Image (cartoon, rainbow, N blue to C red):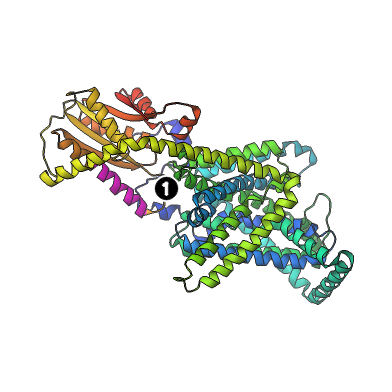
């Protein structure tokens, strides 16, 4: 008889989507993104920066507008260089090579942690500034009387994106495709129109640039002119954020991941470089100047359509274009929601952050990661009042910390493998250029933005790094405390091997299913499981005749990377359970093993338990729980208490479960 879902379950499925089957052989294909969709989900962050990056650089020239050509050329060169260097990272790390993993593998785990913390702060600010600037853009079209609701609207935007991402990456990207395409088509149209319409003025633009260089040289000198260009170039550095998103998000791309990743990177680099260069040239061709309450893009598009015969049509197209800009800024927050939880889960696997961030929901989403990113973004939004001007100061510092560490790691790698790698010099040159450019931008942005509020970003990042060190130290101390339990594994393994040599794997022992049965929950053939087993035998001597071992393989962020990883987990838990069974059989006990895989251990155990109780009606469930010398909020945060959740679940279902303490 099919069990109908409850009202709460139906509501939950409606909002977040129906649960997915982790054992579905085609699940990875269904959840993965082709290059185009990856460009939408991951490339929007970089492309949306064309809404404010070129403007910030152009205005920083302080009236020496024709020097913008040099800034534009430098920006395009930087985009292509960083993209090429990250394409090499994709090749070297085909399963995912974000800034955290690259720095961890090629420099040291500590450098990787610093890179990861910088990325987490950057992705939080990406969500906040994207939604806040999108709200600013949208509210510029409505009466000022509505401005009091702008912050509330921004809060609603973050919450809506959080819910959307809890449904899954693909589900969060697909609804955004029309908006993304509208932005691309309208901006491509205006840029090509401006360049073609004024193609005859290109020679005059060249002459004006030469004249500007001479005038600027006479007014502020060569060094002053050079520093002015570098300052504008550095202040437009927000344009480069988002380039690293593809290498971070490689695990969600369609196979072959490397090919898809490099194609996505090409889409991102070409579209971003073309848009930035096209906009800055168009500013010059149309003599765009700053107007209060309008972006330079809005002024440019207005100047273009003012020359058309149908002003109404032009105004409508400009309106659609600017709305697409505002909407794309919302989409840009996707990079933070997609890659932020992924970085957090990778760092959790290495014990820099609580292990609960590796857990996946039934939609195979890093649910805790998505919630923490959304919640933190809401907090930053509240603290800053959604002020884009202030958020821009905080933004774009941290991403260059990651850029520098990633490029440094790649440079070191190519130098170390120069004997084996034929094209090491070419690859070293690409990453070397990326290292020089990113280092310069990082230092410039810190100096220029430090006193304006940039110090806050560095303070938050430093605090997060300190927190990560504390967590790592705790997990390391816990590991040392658990070392004494591992001696149990060595002796047990020897017993299992001897039993297999003497009797083989098919030794039969008679049993009565109605006898007392101990069902022991284990998470591997390890000291914790054996300690729980010995505790049952010691506390209840000669009570239990049958022993059943139940292990649920947790499909988390470390496992859910491909079919091969899931199969490996399945084989491992089967072997673990078999070892327990063989170990008990040598002492004359009847033993069986049950194994399964799921993303929620509590739900899976509750589903398997009735099958065990049907076969062994006189069963008592046992689970072990670590007990620390000093219990605190910190220890409860860093360790899962799944066994207590199971006990509560069994309590409501009338099933007996005993929790045995394991003191460390």
Whether residue 149 is visible? yes
Q: Is residue 628 above or below residue 51?
A: above
Residue 578 in the image, given as x and y percentages of width and height: 22, 42
Query: Could you say whether the residue bearing mark 1 is in a helix, strand or loop?
Result: loop
- Residue 209 to residue 375: above or below: below
Crowding at mark 1 (Cα within 10 Å: few <14, some 14-19, many 20+): some
Q: Is residue 434 left or right of residue 655?
A: right
Say which quadrant the N terminus sits in: top left
Image point 50% across, 61% down: which residue?
A: 90
Q: Position of residue 573 (x, y in %)?
A: 29, 44
Q: Closer to the camera, 396 or 444?
A: 444
Is residue 565 a member of the stretch shown in magenta? yes
Decide which of 340, 537 is in the foreground and name it.
Answer: 537
Total numbered labels: 1
Q: Give whichever of 111, 154 is nearer the camera.
A: 111
Q: Give the main secondary structure, helix, strand or loop, of the magenta stretch.
A: helix
- Report which quarter residue 440 is drawn in: bottom right
From the viewer's side, name the closer residue of 527 and 345: 527
**Residue 135 visible at all:** no
Give the residue at mark 1: 558
Q: Residue at x 77, y 54 (%)?
A: 295
Q: Which span of residues is magenta-colored?
A: 563-577
Q: Residue at x 56, y 57 (%)?
A: 406
Say whether residue 154 is magenta: no
Q: Position of residue 125 (x, y in %)?
A: 64, 45
Q: Quadrant of the C terminus?
A: top left
User: Residue 635 in the image: x percent, y percent?
Assistant: 46, 31
């Amino acid at each position: 008889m099919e069990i109908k879902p409850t009202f709460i379950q139906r509501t939950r499925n409606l909002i977040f989507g129906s649960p997915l089957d982790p054992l579905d052989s085609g699940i990875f294909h269904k959840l993965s993104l082709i290059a185009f969709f990856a460009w939408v989900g991951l490339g929007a962050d970089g492309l949306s920066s064309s809404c404010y990056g070129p403007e910030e650089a152009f205005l920083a020239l302080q009236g020496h507008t024709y020097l913008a050509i040099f800034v534009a050329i430098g920006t395009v060169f930087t985009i292509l260089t960083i993209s090429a260097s990250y394409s090499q990272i994709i090749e070297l790390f085909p399963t995912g090579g974000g800034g955290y993993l690259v720095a961890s593998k090629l420099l040291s785990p500590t450098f990787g942690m610093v890179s990861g913390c910088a990325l987490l702060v950057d992705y939080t600010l990406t969500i906040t500034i994207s939604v806040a600037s999108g709200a600013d853009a949208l509210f510029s079209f409505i009466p000022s009387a509505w401005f009091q609701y702008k912050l509330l609207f921004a809060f609603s935007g973050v919450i809506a994106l959080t819910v959307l991402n809890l449904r899954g990456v693909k589900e969060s990207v697909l609804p955004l495709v029309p908006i993304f395409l509208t932005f691309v088509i309208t901006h491509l149209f205006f840029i090509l129109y401006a360049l073609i319409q004024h193609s005859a003025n290109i020679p005059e633009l060249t002459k004006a640039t030469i004249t500007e260089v001479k005038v600027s040289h006479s007014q502020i000198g060569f060094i002053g002119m050079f520093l002015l260009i570098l300052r504008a170039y550095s202040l437009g550095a927000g344009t480069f954020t988002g380039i690293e998103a593809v290498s971070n998000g490689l695990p969600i791309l369609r196979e072959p991941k490397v090919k898809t990743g490099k194609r996505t990177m090409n889409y991102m680099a070409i579209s971003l470089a073309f848009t930035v260069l096209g906009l800055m040239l168009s500013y010059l061709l149309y003599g765009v100047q700053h107007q209060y309450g309008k972006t330079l893009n809005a002024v440019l598009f207005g100047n273009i359509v003012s020359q058309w015969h149908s002003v109404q049509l032009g105004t409508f197209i400009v309106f659609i274009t600017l709305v697409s800009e505002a909407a794309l800024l919302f989409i840009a927050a996707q990079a933070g929601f997609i890659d932020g939880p992924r970085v957090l889960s990778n760092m959790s696997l290495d014990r820099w952050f609580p292990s609960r961030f590796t857990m996946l929901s039934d939609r195979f989403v890093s649910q805790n990661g998505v919630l923490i990113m959304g919640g933190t973004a809401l907090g930053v939004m509240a603290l800053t009042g959604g002020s884009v001007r202030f958020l821009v100061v905080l933004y774009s510092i941290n991403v260059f910390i990651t850029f520098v560490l990633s490029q440094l790691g790649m440079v070191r790698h190519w130098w170390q493998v120069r004997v084996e790698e034929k094209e090491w010099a070419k690859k070293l040159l690409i990453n070397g250029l990326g290292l020089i450019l990113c280092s310069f931008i990082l230092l410039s942005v810190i100096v220029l933005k430090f006193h304006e509020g940039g110090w806050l970003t560095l303070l938050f990042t430093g605090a997060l790094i300190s927190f990560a060190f504390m967590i790592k130290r705790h997990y390391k101390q816990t590991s040392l405390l658990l070392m004494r339990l591992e001696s149990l594994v060595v002796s047990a393994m020897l017993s299992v091997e001897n039993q297999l040599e003497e009797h083989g794997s098919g030794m039969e022992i008679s049993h009565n299913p109605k006898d007392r049965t101990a069902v022991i929950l284990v998470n591997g053939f390890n000291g914790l499981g054996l300690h729980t087993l010995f505790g049952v035998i010691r506390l209840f001597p000669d009570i239990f005749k049958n022993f059943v071992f139940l292990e649920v393989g947790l499909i988390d962020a470390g496992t859910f990377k491909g079919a091969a990883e899931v199969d490996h987990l399945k084989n491992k838990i089967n072997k673990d359970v078999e070892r327990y069974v063989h170990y008990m059989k040598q002492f004359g006990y009847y033993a069986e093993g049950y194994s399964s895989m799921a993303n929620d251990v509590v739900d899976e155990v509750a589903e398997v338990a009735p099958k065990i109780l049907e076969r062994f009606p006189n069963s008592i469930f046992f689970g072990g729980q670590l007990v620390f010398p000093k219990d605190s909020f910190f220890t409860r945060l860093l360790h899962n208490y799944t066994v207590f959740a199971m006990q509560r679940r069994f309590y409501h279902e009338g099933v007996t479960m005993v929790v045995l303490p394991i003191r460390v």
